[in-house]
Amino acid sequence: MPATLTEIAKVAGVSIATVSRVLNHVDHPISEKTRQRILKLAAELNYQPNLVARSLRIDSTSTVGIIVESMTSPFIPPIISGIQNVLKPAGYLSFILNTNDDPDIEIESIHMLNNRQIDGILFVAIWDRSPKMVEQMTTKPHVFIHRHFDSYADNCVAVDERWGARLAVSHLANLGHQRIAFINGAPDWDASIFRLKGYQEELKSRGIPYDPDLVTHQGWEPEHGQSGIDLLFSKGVSFSALFAGNDLIAMGAIHALQDRGLRVPQDIAVIGYDDRAFTSFVRPAISTVTLPAYEMGEASARLLLSMMKGELKSSKAVEVRGRLLVRESCGAGLTRRTLNEDMA
């Protein structure tokens, strides 16, 4: 049975207050010899702190709630892993509430956390509520992850989508492509909006004219890659490279190009986005830009820790950048040119 503070104090020959100060790491003048003796006894006697009592004393539970939109998303687990790998060494326990893409469950989850003693909330890819709406529902320190709210809101950790799009277009331009088509995702998504901006910015920086006929907004599934290719060909536009809004679109587009007798990358170079697990196993293996989910989790946890400690009241948006992964589908291995991956 675990020992109490009273039992440790009796064996150590010191006061209960002294034992409490040592085990709670209170800054108080105690000799190092006494401190080490108390710590050793606590370990030998299997002392377990009363976390409930401790939380009442210091008004902190060292607990964080994580509200996620859907655990079925492939990006949620690495985000949570990044969060917990930062919070755990800092002494924080986290628990997850899954809303199953239901905005009503999300509201219930916020109210549930408000009624419990937790120190902060992390919203992972939640429904598209404004930050002010969330602030009206909770006064606890909170951070939004993987949401832009149509702009870079405060206390938000998100992907630098423009940077990722520029990486993809830059790489294709470095390979000599001037006619770069873009099959984007759903037009009303933040990711689509910012990736289009990045696409346009990179073309402009290289003096390549923007042709709206080369751009189509579809959706995020493989069939949207196929329909995007069909639309581009129905317009009669010529292009030698394709930037796909995500890897699923890229996969569907590659199949559609192959059905038309075109080779990837020999005839059309293709780059996707997200670095889904399948991209390195299909043939051709798909070049892509990583979606830095784990890194977003780390950054959001560090931000929330600063807020919970009172070191920071709020923060400007934190943008996390992905990386370009060059595989077979872009055709980089088919040229002897020296490539400079740094964007102009």
Image (cartoon, helix red, strand yellow):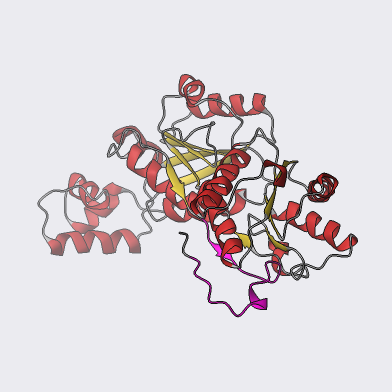
Residue 339: give x, y in percent of width and height. 53, 72
Residue 145: give x, y in percent of width and height. 51, 41
Q: Is residue 202 visible?
A: yes
Residue 123: give x, y in percent of width and height. 53, 37
| In the image: residue 6, left or right of residue 96 | left
- Quarter containing the C terminus: bottom left
| Residue furthest to the top | 136
Q: Is residue 50 visible?
A: no
Work out whether residue 180 or residue 67 is closer to the camera in this orientation and state it: 180
**Is 264 colored magenta in this rendering?**
no
Q: Residue at x 53, y 61 (%)?
A: 323
Q: Residue at x 40, y 53 (%)?
A: 2
Q: For residue 170, which quarter of the picture?
A: bottom right
| In the image: residue 300, left or right of residue 313 | right
**Is 336 colored magenta in this rendering?**
yes
- Quarter containing the N terminus: bottom left
Residue 54, relative to residue 239: is it above or below?
above
Q: Main secondary structure of the magenta part?
A: loop
Work out whether residue 61 or residue 239 is closer to the camera in this orientation and state it: 239
Q: For residue 238, which quarter of the picture?
A: bottom right
Q: Residue at x 68, y 71 (%)?
A: 331
Residue 10: give x, y in percent of width and height. 22, 53
| In the image: residue 41, left or right of residue 318 | left
| Residue numbers of the magenta segment | 322-341
Work out whether residue 84 or residue 260 is closer to the camera in this orientation and state it: 260
